[in-house]
Amino acid sequence: MLAFLQKIGKSLMFPIATLPAAALLVRLGAEDFFNWPVMAAAGDVILGNLPLIFAIGIAMGFAFDSGGGAALAGAVAHIVLTGVLLSIDKDIKMNVFGGVIAGVIAGLLYNKFYNVKFPEWLSFFGGRRFVPIITAVVMMLVGWLFGYAWPPVQGWINDAGNWAIDHGSIGVGVYGFLNRLLIPVGLHHVINTVVWFDFGSFTTSDGTVVKGEINRFLKGDPTAGPFLSGFFPIMMFGLPAACLAMYMTAKKEKKALVGGMFVSIALTAFITGVTEPIEFSFMFLSPVLFFVHAVLTGLSLMAANWLGIHDGFGFSAGLIDYVLNFGIATKPLLLIPLGLVVGAIYFAIFYFMIIKFDLKTPGREDDDEDEDGSTPLTGSTDEVLDAKAYHIIEGLGGKENIKRIDYCTTRLRLDVKDSTIIDEKKLKKYGARGVMKISKTNAQVIIGTSVEFLAEAMKVRLDNGNPPLKSDVSAEDIKSEDDVLSGAFIPADFTMPVTGEIIPLTDVPDKAFSEGMMGPGFGIQIEDGVITSPIDGKVVMIFPSKHAIGLVSDSGLEVLIHIGLDTVKLDGQGFETVVETDQLVQRGDVLIKVDLDYVSANVPSLVTPIILTNSQGKEVTLLKTGHQEAGTANIIDVK
């Protein structure tokens, strides 16, 4: 569930990225700026269609390939949901929540049905073309369900919003505290969505009803802003002051090393309001400091509310948004003295706690931990990025440990085989601000606002097997994919997928397999109905008749498991698939369950060929023969 919520949080960054553009257009087109209605209208139309934008963006975020087909499905999902709700009760308004739900469902359906196949006469509607169709049907049912279930849910949300609003400073303080406290697990975006886009209601002069703190503030609601104002003192003054305290308390010989980093991330927070690079620089080194930071954030929001300050932002509470929205804010000048007070408090508390409790913030590591300091890389921009990508991959445990790379605003989000082998010191040495091990197979590495470029560079390197840096070895071309694969097969990494008797491929009673037309491999006279994965990798194909499955290992080895001979004619009868296409699997994970009695009675043979489909020209040597149990390693070698 945590991973699922984190995926929603990450996907929310797609539509949220449109907010700065909308806010900029609305403000610059306003009467107190350029007084250009065309520009203001361009921003208004973005804010007015946020639910649709959320549906499209989140569907893309959930799609395994971020494909345009998923975006179309997200749009269809939102349109159908809205239409069905209106047909039931015109007063039902799911707003951005409807967009989020539509986007999640559309993305999941895209991953499920993007490669579905139909008979020849229906083939036009197969694959990605089928996704909008099934999405429309599913969302019709979902809309009908929400038409009766949503009103009480909306009532609870309104009650929560009203409680926070009615309780004034306490309400905004609780929100500010939770907003920071949830950053380590990336769930702050989820509660932000509720506050930013659903809290409160305001009717504009033309009769348009808008909801959410950000939209209401930009539309001129004088009551909007309490849940936003208090972030300006934190991001523009508090956290930069914390950087100053960490610099002042750093060891003398390390101040030059960490000084540049602190100046960079402090300016980033002050100007843009992006604070995660600062927060992750001390979050895990000293969790107590982060808890204090969360408390101070809540208190800052409370203080801004006590002073009657109403200010807002389109992206984050930095100098850019402060200047843009100065003309429509209430008492914005008070944010400066409040920010100076907050900055002084941050500096005093951080300085005192770091010295008093000898906290190991950056620059205060013990001498035997010198390698923790960020090591600057020299060379051209491309060389530095490539070198950084190489070392980050190695710090994550190597390419074999990385299953999937994703990213949000400032952090890498990773699916790994084993998070316990991640080398945090190495990651920090090459630029990581912090490491969050969410679970055994899920981790996050905080990089900063350049994370997108690093993530793409890492993907390129992983696609090529993360070859050694050219500066560290003799200049040679990166090996081709086939060359990488030729050296990637390790017998211990390939296990017996099912209990049975191993036989040479030439003994398989089917020429297409025995003569190697499909590729090298071997056969198994299966004795058990549970087919498991012989590799760590991903499911790339499941035949519609469920009698065969294709896998690809983390090193690129493609494996086809064909259960029995002539089993395609059973049309799926006797087979139960346990996994889905694009699902990550590990050795021993159950793939398919087979009713052996039914299948053996209806096909000529239960001999199951195991084919390495991308290893043409290579030889499979049987290291073991005869009866072998599922999970047995070192059964074959490939050269």
Image (cartoon, rainbow, N blue to C red):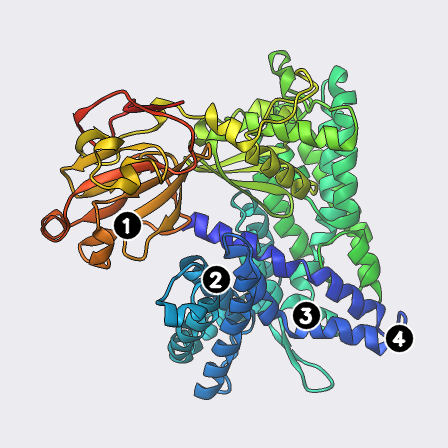
What's the residue type where badge 4 is placed? Answer: Asn
Indicate the secondary structure of the residue bearing disc 3: helix
N-terminal label among 1 and 2: 2
Relative to 453, is 270 on the left or the right? right
Around disc 3, counting alpha carbons within 10 Å, would you say few (fewer than 14), some (14 to 19), or many (20 or more)? many
- Which residue corresponds to mark 1? 578
N-terminal label among 1 and 4: 4
Residue at 90%, 71% (x, y): give it. Answer: 34
Residue at mark 3 to residue at mark 1: CA–CA distance: 45 Å
Of the pair 307 and 592, the residue shown nearer to us: 592
In the rendered picture of this protein, how many numbered marks are placed on residues?
Answer: 4
What's the residue type where badge 2 is placed? Answer: Val
Around disc 2, counting alpha carbons within 10 Å, would you say few (fewer than 14), some (14 to 19), or many (20 or more)? many
N-terminal label among 2 and 3: 2
In x, y percent, where is residue 37? Answer: 84, 78
Residue at 52%, 51% (x, y): give it. Answer: 187
Relative to 361, is 138 on the left or the right? left
- Which residue corresponds to mark 3? 215
Of the pair 534 and 227, the residue shown nearer to us: 534
Give the foreground label among 2 and 3: 2
